[in-house]
């Protein structure tokens, strides 16, 4: 049951990333691009979580999950700041 939750979370993040990417392709609003990349990082993070807890529980993949999450959040923050700076500057 635990593995199903991880798969559903990854699937939901993948659908969000796809919808955001489609919105970006249509409108070229860069904030949609950065949000799509963030959700893509969530897909990778949830996939690593599934592997960590279900597939290979003897390995500790927590550092990899944290790095992927940090990269995703940093990319989103960069995109938010960059877009805000572009609009005001």
Image (cartoon, rainbow, N blue to C red):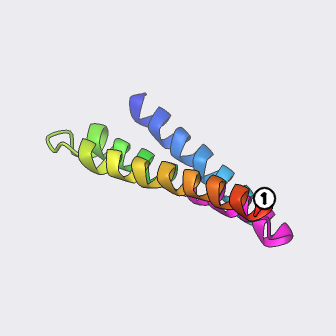
Q: Residue at x 40, y 29 (%)?
A: 2
Can you give x and y, in whole percent of width and height, for residue 67 in the image?
33, 51
Question: What's drawn in magenta, residue-wise?
Answer: 23-39
The secondary element bearing badge 1 is classed as helix
Q: In this view, does 66 lie to the left or right of 34?
A: left
Q: Residue at x 26, y 42 (%)?
A: 62
Can you give x and y, in whole percent of width and height, for residue 53 in the image?
29, 37
Q: In this view, does 74 lie to the left or right of 87?
A: left
Report which quarter residue 8 is drawn in: top right
Q: Tell me if residue 18 comes above or below residue 45 in the rendering.
A: below
Q: Tell me if residue 52 comes above or below residue 38 in the rendering.
A: above
Q: Is residue 6 left or right of residue 21?
A: left
What main secondary structure does the magenta stretch of the protein show? helix
Q: Which residue is drawn at 78% across and 58% down?
A: 88
Q: Which residue is drawn at 61% across and 44% down?
A: 12
Camera-side residue: 39 or 85?
85
Query: Is 37 contained in the magenta span?
Result: yes
Classed neighbour count for the residue bearing mark 1: other residues with Cα under 10 Å, few (<14), some (14–19), many (≥20): few
Report which quarter residue 34 is drawn in: bottom right
Quadrant location, the C terminus: bottom right
- Determine which residue is flagged by label 1: 88
Can you give x and y, in whole percent of width and height, for residue 81 in the image?
63, 54
Q: Tell me if residue 56 comes above or below residue 21 in the rendering.
A: above
Q: Which residue lies furthest to the right in this view?
A: 27
């Amino acid at each position: 049951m635990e593995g199903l939750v991880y798969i559903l979370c990854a699937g939901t993040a993948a659908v969000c990333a796809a919808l955001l990417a489609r919105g970006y392709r249509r409108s070229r609003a860069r904030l949609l691009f950065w949000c799509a990349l963030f959700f893509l990082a969530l897909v990778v993070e949830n996939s690593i979580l599934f592997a960590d807890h279900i597939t290979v529980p003897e390995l500790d993949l927590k550092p990899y999950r944290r790095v992927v999450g940090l990269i995703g959040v940093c990319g989103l923050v960069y995109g938010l700041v960059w877009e805000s700076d572009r609009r005001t500057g």
